[in-house]
Image (cartoon, rainbow, N blue to C red):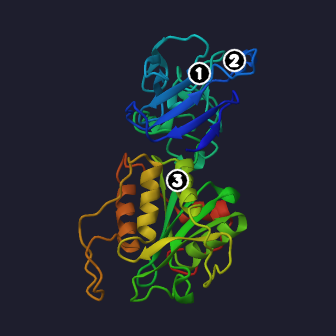
Amino acid sequence: MQRQTTPEGSHVYRKSHHTIPTPAGSHVFRKPLTLDEIADDNGKKRGYETSIYFYHPDHLGTNTLITDLHGDPYQFFANLPYGETMIEQSNIVDYDNPFKFNGKELDTETGLYYYGARYYDPKLSGWLSVDPLAEKYSAWSPYVYVLNNPVVLTDPDGLTPRIYVDTQGLTGHSFVTVGEGKNTVVYSYGRYAELGKDKSSARSTTPTGEGVLIRLTGKDAQSFIKNQMINNEARAYEFSQADDNKVAEYFENQFNTNDKIPATGPYQDDPNARVVDTYNLFENNCTTKSTEAIKVGSDGAVDIKDNVSTAMPFSPYYDGKVITPHKLNKMLQSKSKSEGSGVREVKYEEVKKELNLQNGTGSSW
């Protein structure tokens, strides 16, 4: 379970199993305890168990139902598509849940939701300030909420994850980033420690090896992206249906499952690299890790699959099921041209401006 601190100083815990089924996971909530609830005259704690509640969010994270420790309904909330309260019923005794639409906190005095980057007015169905990332969506008003598609999309923090796809060489490579500008974090998976070879030279006929996940931040992350964009002409794609935080959590959980640091290769003895599993070129590779992260980050809304086999006669191991970086790039290009897909190709000029890149070496740049 992952603990998150709420504004009240209480805690929310992710919980995957309990007796009450929910459509999109659940959260366990404990309201703040007062001094007289903490201990009685004999010093014995009291009031703790009865103050536990379960959140039951929908696919957008809206806490439509809260139940108590016994599974009885405690508070019910329903909203119009853009978040305005439609109906609310409760058995409030000592606490009123403020986390409603999208799981964001509602300010009862102003009627506004705070999303981290700016305030949202559900009655006006719009933001009260300009989108800090408005340049990305120049065709839309900077005040519009989730491209006028609130039934499908959310805006957790204004940032969305990206997949970068390099199609240079025999196999190419893909990796994921979260954050933006100097706050960008790179997650790249590959055989960085295989036989002491780096990612490029490890693309051999041997399909397996140590699966290494690297996590780069700050200047290291920017340098990595610059190299991929300039030297390998990598393409970037952004996913509006996926949440930066959930994608980061997916990779962080994998990164922290093992303390083993590569003993060879370009990330030898580097704490930013971890051997997380066994790499397999045709089953568990850079594209499977990248697409799985986006799937998790979108709660399953973005599931990149391809049933068309790619012929690779030179490999005796290939079973026709793997999505290569070349195929992934074509799939994402196609999705980015489809309205409502939630996939947007990030043009090179945009990344260049964001990270102060120089002109690339290839004809595309």
Which badge, 1 or 3, comes first in the chain's sequence? Answer: 1
* Residue pointed to by mark 1: 51
In the rendered structure, find residue 102 and report the number of the disc placed on it: none
Q: Position of residue 211 (x, y in %)?
A: 50, 74
* Dot 1 amino acid type: Ser
Q: Residues within 10 Å of mark 2 (few under 14, many from 20)?
A: some
Which badge, 2 or 1, comes first in the chain's sequence? Answer: 2
Q: Residues within 10 Å of mark 3 (few under 14, many from 20)?
A: many
Residue 155 seen by the camera:
no
Q: Position of residue 113 (x, y in %)?
A: 60, 27
Which badge, 2 or 3, comes first in the chain's sequence? Answer: 2
Q: Is residue 45 above or below residue 24?
A: above
Dividing the image into 4 quarters, which one contains the N terminus? top right
Q: Quadrant of residue 10?
A: top right
Spatial separation of the CA atoms under disc 2 and disc 3: 38 Å
Residue found at x 31% / y 60%: 305
* Residue pointed to by mark 3: 247
Q: Is residue 342 above or below residue 199?
A: above
Q: Secondary structure at mark 3?
A: helix
* Dot 2 amino acid type: Glu
* Dot 3 amino acid type: Val
Pair 1/3: label in front: 1
Spatial separation of the CA atoms under disc 1 and disc 3: 31 Å
Are the two marked residues, 2 and 1, in contact with CB atoms closer than 8 angstroms? yes
Residue found at x 47% / y 47%: 240
Are the two marked residues, 1 and 3, in contact with CB atoms closer than 8 angstroms? no
Q: Position of residue 178 (x, y in %)?
A: 58, 56
Q: Secondary structure at mark 2?
A: helix
Q: Nearer the viewer, residue 105 or 165?
A: 105
Residue 206 seen by the camera:
yes
Residue found at x 45% / y 78%: 172
* Residue pointed to by mark 2: 37
